[in-house]
Amino acid sequence: MKALFLAIPAALALSACSTTTPVETTPAPSTQLAYERMAPEVFTCEDDSELLVKYLVDKTQTTITATVPKVSWSGQVVVLNRAPAASGVRYVNDSSDNIEYEWHAKGDTGIFAFNWANGNEYELKCQR
C-alpha cells in the first residue's frame, strides 16, 4: 500500500508534463533564406569584374552580386526575374525607368548587360 501512495504522485507529475496541444510546424523558409543557403556560382568577367550568381531553387529568379570597376560597383546586388530565352537561361530586371539589366548564361559562359534609357550600353562577357 505504501508503494501505491508513492507511485501516485510520480504518475501525476509525469501526466502533467504531457501535452495535448498540437505541435507547431516550422514555416517554409523565405526566398531570401533559400538564397542564403545556396553557394554562388562565381563568374570572372572582362574588365576585372566578378559576378556571384545565385539561382532560386525553382529558377524563377536570380541574385547577382557584382563587382564591376567600370561602373564603380563593389558588391552591388541585382535581383533579376526569369525571361524567355532561345537557349540557356535569361533573366532581366527592367523595374527602373533609367536602366535595364540582363543576365544570359549557357554552360560555363554568361553575359551581363546594362542598357540605359539614354541608349548607352555596357556588356560583360563572363566565364565560370
Image: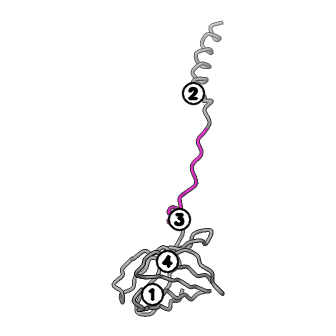
> Marks 4 and 1, how far apart in space?
11 Å
- Residue 75, compared with residue 28, is above or below; it is below
Discs 2/3, front: 3
Label 1: element kind:
strand
Which residue is at the far top?
1
27 falls in the magenta region: yes
Q: Is residue 61 left or right of residue 74?
A: right
Badge 2: residue crowd in 10 Å (few <14, some 14–19, many ≥20): few
Badge 1: residue crowd in 10 Å (few <14, some 14–19, many ≥20): some
Q: Amino acid at mark 2?
A: Cys
Residue 58 occupies quadrant: bottom right
Determine contact: label 2, label 4, CB under 8 Å: no
Badge 3: residue crowd in 10 Å (few <14, some 14–19, many ≥20): few
Q: Amino acid at mark 1?
A: Asn
Q: Quick one: 94 or 66, which is closer to the camera? A: 94
Label 4: element kind:
strand
Discs 4/3, front: 4
> Marks 2 and 3, how far apart in space?
36 Å
- Residue 31, compared with residue 127, is above or below; it is above
Which comes sooner in the sequence, label 4 or label 3?
A: 3
- Residue at numbered disc 1: 115
> Marks 2 and 1, how far apart in space?
64 Å
- Residue at numbered disc 2: 17
Which comes sooner in the sequence, label 1 or label 3?
A: 3
- The N terminus lies in quadrant: top right
- Residue at numbered disc 3: 37
- Name the mark on residue 93: 4
> Marks 1 and 3, how far apart in space?
31 Å
